[in-house]
Image (cartoon, rainbow, N blue to C red):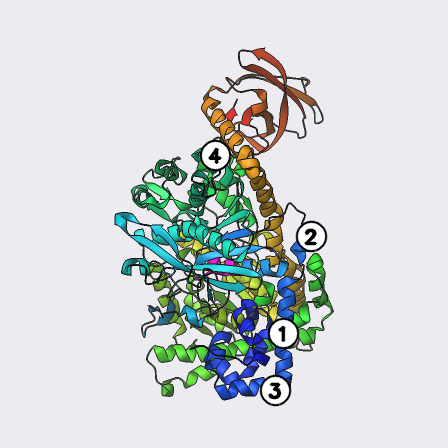
Amino acid sequence: MRTVLPESIAPLSRLARNLRWSWHRPTEQLFAELNPQAWDAVHGDPVKLLGSLTREEIQQIAQDPATVRRIEELDADLERYLTDDLWYQRTQSEDAPRAIAYFSAEYGVTSVLPQYSGGLGILAGDHLKSASDLGVPVVGVGLFYQHGYFKQSLSRDAWQQESYPVLDPDGMPLTLLREEDGSPVRITLPLPNGRSLSAHVWRADVGRVPLLLLDSDIPDNDDHARNITDRLYGGGGDHRLQQELLLGMGGIRALRAFSRLTGAPAPEVFHCNEGHAGFLGVERIAELMDPADGTEPMTWDEALTAVRSATVFTTHTPVPAGIDRFEQAQIAHFLNAGLAPSVPTAEVLSLGAEDYAGGDPAKFNMAVMGLRLAQRANGVARLHGVVSRGMFQGLWPGFDVEEVPIGSITNGVHVMTWIDPRMAELALDPMGSDLNRAARWRRIYGVDDAELWAVRRELRTRLVEDVRARLRASWKKRGLADAELGWTDTVLDPGVLTIGFARRVPTYKRLTLMLRDPQRLKRILLDPEHPVQLVVAGKSHPADEQGKRLIQDLVRFTDDPEVRHRIVFLPNYDIAMARTLFPGCDVWLNNPLRPLEACGTSGMKAALNGGLNLSVLDGWWDEMYDGQNGWAIPTADEGAHPDERDDIEAAALYELIENHVAPRFYGETAEGSDPESDGVPHQWLAMVKHTLATLGPQVSAKRMLEDYVRHLYVPAAVSGRRAALDGHVAARAKSRWVGRVRQAWDQVTVEHVDAEGVAQEPQIGDELTVCAYVSLGSLSPDDVCAEIGYGRVSETDHIHERKYAGLSPVDDLGGGRHKFCGTITVDRSGPFGYTVRVLPAHPELADKAELGLVTNA
């Protein structure tokens, strides 16, 4: 049954179904004030709120002129937001893509749409929200999971327990995508043994951005197929593979249906957020090899060239164990069922083949396929880019690790989702614009310290109240009666330094590093002059027994009556909890094993609210820590034994809290131990202001989106358009060129190198002329570039800090032999060396290492 609203307040329905309310405070406040008691009962869900109102309550709202006027104003504001020219329309040239398809296995937009597990999903949600705020024409594609991710609770003995409540899409801010005759759009994939997998498509509106979610729980499917989209990251083997086939191949088909039915422009750029959606490239190749519009079919190589040109791949994984891998035979079994009849199965298998040193030839690697299907790829922080280039170096043999064509764009967070309204009021200039974001944040420097300190205490107090309510509810689920829970009313203290730690719980994030020396931690928590309190939250994957044991160890410590008023573990960490947790914490703790944190955006959300980070130099913190915005936890030497490493880093953590963090929070001056006289810790607040002013603009997801647009989306759109022009003539030509170069590359050799121009005692500034005699076989100088690489030489005769300069063809020596020459300037003292190499060269290559071909002297 659906609520029918009177015409005067009918816009409430649109305001509820567009998820902009989740970050637009005036709209969220409107719903909260319609019926505060009902709002709390539906956990802040506008769609459920409207469904819970009685006929009398609806009439009462409709007859209140002030409320009706407010609804009209907010609806008009939403209309302006959806139609105005924003940053993208104002700043981008005609090269910018008309539409960008963004594929992700999970999306964390709001807690009322629980389709996320952790950082990857929250990042994807923030990506869509920021795209909406900037006017970037993104269309999101994902799956609708009938049970979402699990809800977490604790047993009496502190063991994680999972439950999977059924989600009803009809009661959520979703609309079913329908054909013109009103029937639901149906996406169908053939499966082995004559079976099929069909899905309906739900649409969520994330501001200006449509999000398409495929749902297999429909009557057309048999029982097994209905359960393919049962839960996020549930099941394994064939189940997970079918989820990823539906996400990638089915997602492309859903996009085509969406454009056909709505008139939305077809995407020009395809962004694969992690490897789960990698099969989107296979579906696009199939479209070109077997075109439905009667155009000339393309070969595999031609279609692969065209698809790669407009594809972007983002890896979030710093460890090989985090990548989905399937058996090659398993992939072949599903492809041979007719998923893409015109596409050669052997070629698809080669995309995910681990055919490099250390790889397993029996495995199909989703990240490897993602990289091979994309002409542009990136990690999610500067350090993660370095890690990713090392992880995947085997795909580009012969190149130094720093030349592997995987760049980096550091993640960001959606400011208006994660900043508390009180802090936004203080820190953000309401008249600022996206064209000068840094200026908006400098407003904080003019705020009086006492006012800022009062707001920080207010946010801490709200967190304490929330923690007490959640802790009491958790203990009741663990079996305690109300009469045994009086102590929860005094847990935490609004005047005590509060440290937060909330993460997924794989072992590398080291949830229990803080427990390395339990007695020392107790002394820190109970210090009579500088007490500390800790709020901890996090979920372990249901199949991760080791992660569950870490949670159990921590919870057993928090259960100790001696410290339970100073340290708590909150189960079922989600967006709703986070929006109170981040603003209420004074310090955000992060202690992963370096360099295994891809980015770690939780600390960014704390920084937006004036929280100071206390973190290992990993992920985003490695590049944004400046000595005044928090503290860096020193790391042990790389060769240290794991136990020794944890001992060293835990001791460093304790020392920082005891001697630096806590004294400064309690107002002790740098010169001595006397607290500041007015009770306001001015030196602490100087760090808070510096954090807000400098990190605020840097950690913004708008900054991240602008980076994606400039460095990846626009170049991919330009490449994709060129490749597709005139029936893909450029893609066809490039694929022929690539085939010719690959076939001939074994013939390419550097036969001899001459150098002249350096005196017997060379000096800085001398010019060195280098000539290389190169055999190109059947290739011509136009097919290649020759380079001299030079720099400092180590004792092992390896060139470090290498620079490259081009060599030009100067003489055709006949028989496929050519002479290349060039000049460099000696620019450093000490051992100096040089070498020559030859690489393929073509105007449509995005990077000189793209083909993975190089011949070194």
Q: Marks 1/4: CA distance?
A: 50 Å
- The residue at which mark 2 appears reads as 91
Q: Residue at x 33, y 69 (%)?
A: 159
Badge 1 local density, few (<14 within 10 Å), some, or many (20+)? some
Say which element carries label 3.
loop
Distance between mark 2 and mark 4 Cα atoms: 34 Å
Residue of label 3: 64
Q: Does residue 614 appear in this view?
A: no
Q: Amino acid at mark 3?
A: Asp
Query: Residue 680: x percent and y percent?
Result: 66, 75
Answer whether residue 110 is magenta in the image. yes
Task: Check residue 302 in the rendering and tell me which mark sits there, or answer none.
Answer: 4
Q: Which residues are magenta?
A: 106-127
Sequence-wise, the earlier of marks 1 and 3 is 3
Which residue bears the numbered disc 1? Answer: 74
Mark 4–mark 3 distance (CA, rounded to whole Å) = 64 Å
1 or 2: tag closer to the N-terminus: 1
Q: Mark 1 and mark 3: span between their CA atoms? A: 16 Å
The residue sitting at 69% across, 59% down in the picture is: 438
